[in-house]
Amino acid sequence: MVIVALYLLDILVQAFAAPCNPNKADIILVYCYPKTIITNIPECPYGWEVNQLALGGVCYNGVHDSGYYQFTIPDLSPKNKSYCGTQSEFKNPIYHFYNSIVSNDSSVIVKSQPVNYSFTCTYHANYLVNQAAFDQRVATVHVKNGSSGSFESQLSLNFYSNAKFSSKKEAPFVVETSEIGSDVFAGVEAKGLSNRFKVVLNNCWATPSSEYFYQIQWPLITKGCATDNSILVHENGKNSRATFQFNAFRFQNIPKLSKVWLHCETHVCDSEKFSCPVVSPSAKH
C-alpha cells in the first residue's frame, strides 16, 4: 500500500511540475567539426522540455548546457545506416550534412507551439597541402566552426623511411648528391575523420619554391595517376591515407633555391556515396 501511494505521488508531482519558462528566441548554434556536429538551441524553446525534443525526430539525446539544450551527432559515419536522421548530399565540391531538432507533439493535447530547428554543416572536399621535402616543415592548418566545417585541420603531408609507410621521417631532410635518384616515400594522411571519408590525391607536383603556383614545376601525380614509370602510387582513395614514392632529384640552374617543395591537391571522398579508389589506366591490365 505504501509503494502504491508513493507511485501515485510521483505521478502527481510530474503532472503538476512547474513548466519551464518559455524562451521565444529563434536562434541555433551549430559547431561543425571534422567528425562531429554539435547543435545548441535556447533552453525551453516555446515551453518545450529537453526530453520532448528529438534530433531528426528519432533521437532524444538532448542535454542541458549553460542555458541551452545541446544535441550531438557523434560520428558522421552512420552506424547501422542511422545517425539520428542526418541526411547528406554532395554538390561538387561541397559536402552537405543536414538535420533538425523537432518537438514531440504526439501527446493527446499540445499547449506549446511546435518547433523545428533545421541546421546544415558544409565541408569542402578539396584541399591543398604542401611540405618542404628536401631541406623547414610547413603546416597550413586551421579549424572552422559555425555552419561551415573543415577537414583541412586533419590533413597532413608526411614523409616516410621506407615503402611500409610505418615510420615517419622528419622533413625537411638533406639529400646528398650521391643520393639523387634514391626513393622518397610520401603520403597525405587524415586523422580524426569519420571512416566513410577516404583520402584521394588528385595532383601532386614539386617546385623549388614554397609557392605552389611557381612557374618551375615537376609533376608527379596527375588526375590521381603517376606521371611516369619512376613514380609508384601505392594507395589512393582506399583509406584515410594515400601514399606514393618517387626518385629524389634536384632542380638545375637554381643556385639560390636549394629546397624542393612538394604540393598535393587532395580530395576527401565520401565512400558511402562514391567509388573512391583511383585506378590508373596502366593498372587495369
Image (cartoon, rainbow, N blue to C red):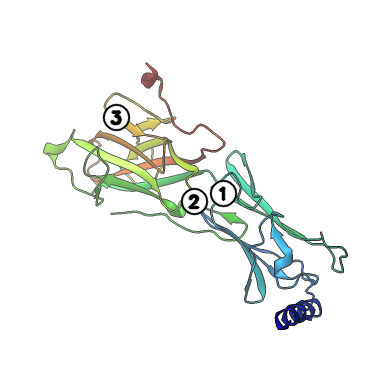
For mark 3, what is the residue? 231
Q: Nearer the viewer, residue 34 or 70?
A: 70
Number of the front mark, 2 or 3: 2
Q: CA distance from mark 1 to mark 3?
A: 31 Å
Going from the N terminus, do you reach mark 1 or mark 3 first? 1
Disc 2 to disc 1: CB gap under 8 Å: yes
269 on left or right of 221? right
Q: Nearer the viewer, residue 46 or 84?
A: 84
Residue 190 visible in image: yes
Q: CA distance from mark 2 to mark 3?
A: 27 Å
Residue 130, position in %: x, y?
Answer: 37, 47
Going from the N terminus, do you reach mark 2 or mark 1 first? 1
Secondary structure category for the residue under label 2: loop
Q: Quadrant of the N terminus?
A: bottom right
Q: Is residue 141 above or below residue 179?
A: below
Residue 219 visible in image: no
Q: Which mark is residue 151?
A: 2
Residue flagged by tag 3: what amino acid is it?
Ile
Going from the N terminus, do you reach mark 2 or mark 3 first? 2
Residue flagged by tag 1: what amino acid is it?
Tyr
Identity of the residue drawn at 17% across and 36% down: 180
Identity of the residue drawn at 54% across and 34% down: 274
For mark 1, what is the residue? 123
Q: CA distance from mark 2 to mark 1?
A: 7 Å
Q: Is residue 203 above or below residue 38?
A: above
